[in-house]
Image: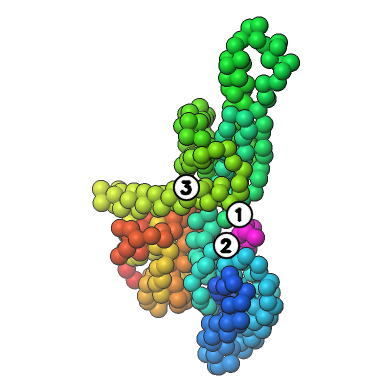
């Protein structure tokens, strides 16, 4: 169970084209005994959707689509035990356009249902962002274990055993080397093969980071001999008392390294954009500046608090984003209201090839909610 780029690709930019898209997020209790309350929770989350489906606030086609959405979503949640190990489920439905996507998340997210013309995807992106694809290498003079840790799942990738000092070898080599020297030669050879293996693995798998574990006397030396390209990807290291291939322990230790790495990266991203703005560089702080920057596709990196929600307006004709207004100041078309314009901003930045940092901890971004590093200076804000 893991979220894939294909899953995300199917929902990013999903547009109902005049029909509403229902986005529902629900936490799944880990304990099956507690799952009895799930259906009730989902029903009450959907109360607003049901009201719209039964009322006169939207047109006939939209009501029919919403009714089908409600039925399909409830069906999905009715089948007990469908999602073992899943912490949350996100559902995106727009039956009138034949859309029904289910994404399982390895992390609990806030319960909510949103009806909008586009899918509300930011919680999925934020979760995905928390999980860099991580290569974990456990170095040891005799045997190297390589694992992949991704979205809380640990998978064994490769085990590499060093050649041992065997008797025939020993007899042959003792003429030239002391046993000690030969053992060291073999160790060195083993490390060389480990480096080569890592280099090859990183060329074929899109790992984001490398975590190095091992005995206290081995780890620092190993990191030092890594090729620069790999060394720059080291998220951190951990020390074990003795050679281990204990899954749970490796997962726990590497997970701790990753969490710390993630916290540090978030703080650095926030610090960098705020400092750039303070120095008068290409950066903007706060919703107004960021929405305008997003409207003109100027955002290179958006830093956004993952729990921030801001109602606003969108112009589907020109891509203009704002906090209020009835008509678009860029093209004069009528705007669409959205329950969270920051989500629209995130999607727009992704579609324009920019990157997103979701900030989940308390940082200097507390008040401002969003900040952005820019590709070019912003044109003046239109006043129409
Ligand atoms: Zn417009």
Residue 88 location in percent, x, y? 57, 69
Indicate whether residue 236 is drawn in magenta.
no
Boundaries of the magenta span: 1-11
The answer to whether residue 62 is above or below residue 157 is below
Residue at figure coordinates x 62%, y 74% from the top left:
32
Q: Which residue is mark 2?
A: 106
Please tell me whether mark 2 sits on a helix, a strand or a loop: loop
Kindly indicate whether the residue at mark 2 contacts the one at mark 1 (C-beta within 8 angstroms): yes
As drawn, which residue projects farthest toward the top? 175
Q: Which residue is mark 1?
A: 153
- Residue 143 left/right relative to 282: right
Residue 241 location in percent, x, y? 51, 39
Kindly indicate whether the residue at mark 1 contacts the one at mark 3 (C-beta within 8 angstroms): no
Q: Earlier in the sequence, mark 1 or mark 2?
A: 2
- The alpha-carbon separation of the residues under discs 1 and 2 comes to 9 Å
Cβ of disc 1 within 8 Å of ligand 1?
A: no
Of 165 and 228, nearer the camera is 165
- Can I make out residue 132 in this image? no
The answer to whether residue 357 is above or below residue 211 is below
């Amino acid at each position: 169970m893991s979220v894939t780029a294909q899953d995300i690709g199917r929902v990013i930019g999903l547009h109902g084209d005049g029909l509403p898209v229902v986005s529902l997020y629900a936490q799944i209790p880990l304990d099956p005994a507690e799952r009895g309350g799930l259906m009730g929770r989902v029903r009450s989350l959907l109360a607003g959707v049901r009201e719209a489906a039964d009322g006169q606030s939207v047109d006939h086609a939209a009501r029919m689509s919403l009714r089908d959405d409600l039925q399909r979503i409830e069906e999905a949640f009715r089948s007990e035990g469908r999602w073992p190990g899943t912490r949350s489920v996100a559902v995106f439905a727009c039956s009138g356009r034949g859309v029904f996507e289910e994404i399982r998340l390895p992390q609990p997210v806030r319960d909510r249902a949103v009806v909008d013309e586009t899918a509300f995807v930011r919680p999925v992106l934020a979760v995905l962002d928390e999980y860099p694809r991580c290569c974990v290498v456990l170095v040891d003079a005799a045997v190297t274990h390589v694992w992949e840790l991704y979205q809380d799942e640990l998978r064994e990738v490769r085990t590499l055993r060093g050649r041992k000092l065997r008797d025939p070898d020993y007899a042959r080599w003792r003429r030239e080397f002391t046993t000690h020297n030969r053992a060291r030669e073999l160790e060195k050879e083993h490390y060389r093969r480990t480096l080569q293996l890592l280099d090859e693995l990183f060329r074929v798998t899109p790992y984001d980071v490398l975590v190095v574990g091992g005995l206290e006397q081995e780890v620092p030396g190993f990191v030092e001999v890594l090729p620069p390209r790999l060394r720059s990807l080291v998220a951190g290291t951990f020390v074990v008392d003795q050679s281990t291939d204990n899954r749970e322990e490796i997962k726990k230790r590497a997970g701790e390294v990753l969490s710390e790495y993630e916290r540090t990266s978030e703080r650095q991203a926030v610090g960098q954009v705020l400092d750039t703005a303070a120095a008068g560089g290409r950066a903007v702080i706060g919703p107004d500046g960021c929405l305008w920057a997003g409207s003109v596709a100027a955002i290179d990196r958006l830093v956004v608090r993952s729990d921030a929600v801001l109602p606003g307006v969108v112009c589907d004709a020109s891509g203009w984003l704002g906090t209020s207004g009835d008509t678009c100041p860029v093209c004069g078309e009528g705007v669409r209201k959205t329950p969270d314009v920051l989500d629209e901003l995130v999607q727009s930045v992704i579609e324009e090839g920019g990157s997103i940092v979701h900030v989940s901890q308390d940082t200097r971004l507390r008040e401002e909610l969003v900040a952005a590093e820019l590709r070019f200076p912003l044109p003046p804000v239109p006043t129409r």
